[in-house]
């Protein structure tokens, strides 16, 4: 059966409406259903929108609407953790966000997608904490070449390198006696957690959750990536404009999440001054082109071979390719669909994401049975009597 026939069978909703650029900027999160829904790992090509044309309302209203939000409302702690690697000459300093539970509690480890950052999980992390309290810990970090993480080998985004980085940061924070771990990876991060899980790199792994990425569809649409990179703005005059572009382009449909997750995606340019600020993208995605196909080749087999519970969350059933459709029919993993979200499912629907991840953990946590009580040998008792 062809991929096209499978997609037609599993269409779950009508095609999305095109984005409305240049209209009133007071867009509620619920109105974002009119934004484009992206079919794969990266955003689908969109018309170029210069940041200066995004605003037609007053500057004050835009600044208030798209003002950045601080990470402190979503995680308990932010710190820099330097990790040495015997296989690499350069150490790496990870920018880490944590909400720690009680000692020994299960650990959710979040890995973001290419060009994104740790705070793409900010709202979901806050919602998980609301549900579990101190019964679980949450770790989200900027991967190599992203956010505030720094390394002498910034452009090495090979799948092997990223998987080892994931292994190293967990080990650096939790040592040999690691708690039960649930890996959660969005987009490229889904490929990284699947790689680590399939290779048995994470001790005590009980679950792998992959968000809106499937091998066949991802590889098919990689050809669109360069076009999209050429069309997106190269600079912004304020962080508010970065956030506004994130929402208007449909990259993030949830305005609150965009206010947290979008500012770390840019850095001041060399020409930036306090009087005339100028921001450029932190991550040079074009420089990672040599790794794009590698990220997703073999993803299906790696995900399915993980010796842990498996969860796939998609923004639409049209994301499923043939192999994953067959595997899902055979019950090899759990599938959930978030039809009201775009590609950034954890940002667009953080409350539901949190509920589903906690339920996934509960279904796969290891039962610790109490020791069997000592029972005297009944035959000996009978003889003695």
Image (cartoon, helix red, strand yellow):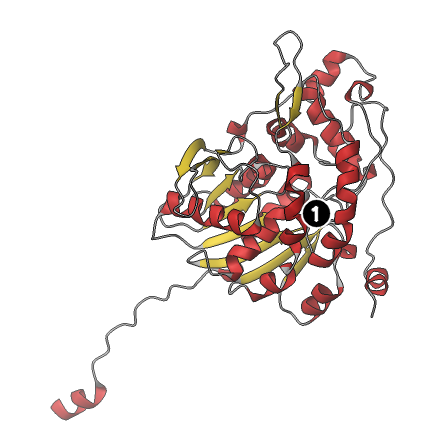
Horizontal and vertical percent position of residue 214: 69, 56
Task: Identify the residue at the far top of this view.
Answer: 275
* Snapshot quadrant of residue 33: top right
Q: Residue at x 61, y 17 (%)?
A: 270
Above or below, 328 against 13 in this view is below
* Snapshot quadrant of residue 279: top right
Between residue 158 and residue 382, name the one nearer to us: 158
In the rendered view, does 34 fall on the left or right side of 315? right
Label 1 element class: loop
Q: Residue at x 52, y 30 (%)?
A: 148
The quarter of the picture where the N terminus appears is: bottom right
Residue 249 visible in image: no
* Snapshot quadrant of residue 374: bottom left
Between residue 239 and residue 220, name the one nearer to us: 220
Q: Residue at x 40, y 44 (%)?
A: 85
Horizontal and vertical percent position of residue 202: 45, 55
Horizontal and vertical percent position of residue 218: 72, 52
In the rendered view, does 304 fall on the left or right side of 369? right
Horizontal and vertical percent position of residue 215: 69, 57
Task: Identify the residue at the far front of this view.
Answer: 89
Residue at which label 1 appears: 41
Residue 288 visible in image: yes
The quarter of the picture where the C terminus appears is: bottom left
Task: Identify the residue at the far bottom of this view.
Answer: 383
């Amino acid at each position: 059966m062809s991929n096209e026939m499978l997609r037609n069978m599993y269409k779950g909703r009508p095609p999305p409406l095109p984005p409305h650029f240049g209209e009133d900027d007071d867009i509620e999160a619920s109105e974002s259903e009119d934004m484009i829904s992206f079919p794969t790992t990266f955003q689908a090509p969109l018309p170029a929108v210069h940041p200066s044309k995004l605003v037609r309302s007053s500057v004050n209203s835009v600044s208030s609407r798209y003002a950045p939000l601080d990470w402190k409302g979503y995680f308990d702690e932010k710190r820099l953790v330097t990790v040495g690697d015997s296989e690499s000459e350069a150490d790496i300093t990870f920018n880490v966000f944590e909400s720690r539970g009680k000692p020994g509690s299960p650990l959710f480890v979040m890995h973001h997608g290419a060009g994104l950052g740790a705070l793409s999980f900010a709202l979901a992390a806050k919602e998980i904490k609301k549900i579990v309290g101190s019964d679980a810990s949450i770790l989200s970090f900027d991967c190599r070449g992203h956010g505030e993480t720094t390394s002498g080998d910034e452009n090495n985004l090979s799948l092997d390198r990223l998987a080892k980085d994931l292994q190293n940061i967990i080990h650096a924070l939790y040592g040999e006696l690691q708690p039960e771990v649930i890996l959660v990876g969005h987009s490229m991060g889904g490929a990284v957690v699947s790689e680590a899980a399939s290779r048995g790199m994470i001790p005590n792994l009980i679950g792998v959750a992959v968000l809106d990425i499937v091998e066949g569809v991802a590889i098919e649409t990689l050809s669109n990536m360069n076009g999209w990179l050429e069309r997106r703005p190269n600079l912004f005059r304020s962080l508010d404009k970065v956030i506004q572009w994130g929402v208007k382009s449909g990259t993030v449909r949830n305005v609150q999440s965009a206010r947290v997750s979008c500012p770390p995606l840019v850095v001041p340019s060399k020409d930036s001054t306090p009087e005339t600020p100028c921001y450029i993208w932190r991550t040079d995605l074009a420089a990672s082109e040599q790794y794009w196909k590698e990220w997703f080749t073999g993803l299906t087999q790696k995900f399915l071979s993980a010796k842990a519970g498996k969860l796939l969350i998609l923004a639409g059933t049209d994301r499923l390719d043939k192999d994953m459709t067959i595997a899902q029919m055979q019950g090899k993993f759990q599938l959930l669909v978030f039809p009201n979200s775009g590609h950034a499912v954890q940002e667009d629907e953080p409350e539901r994401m949190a509920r589903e991840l906690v339920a996934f953990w509960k279904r796969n946590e290891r039962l610790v049975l109490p020791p069997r009580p000592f029972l005297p040998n009944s035959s000996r008792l009978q003889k003695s009597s």
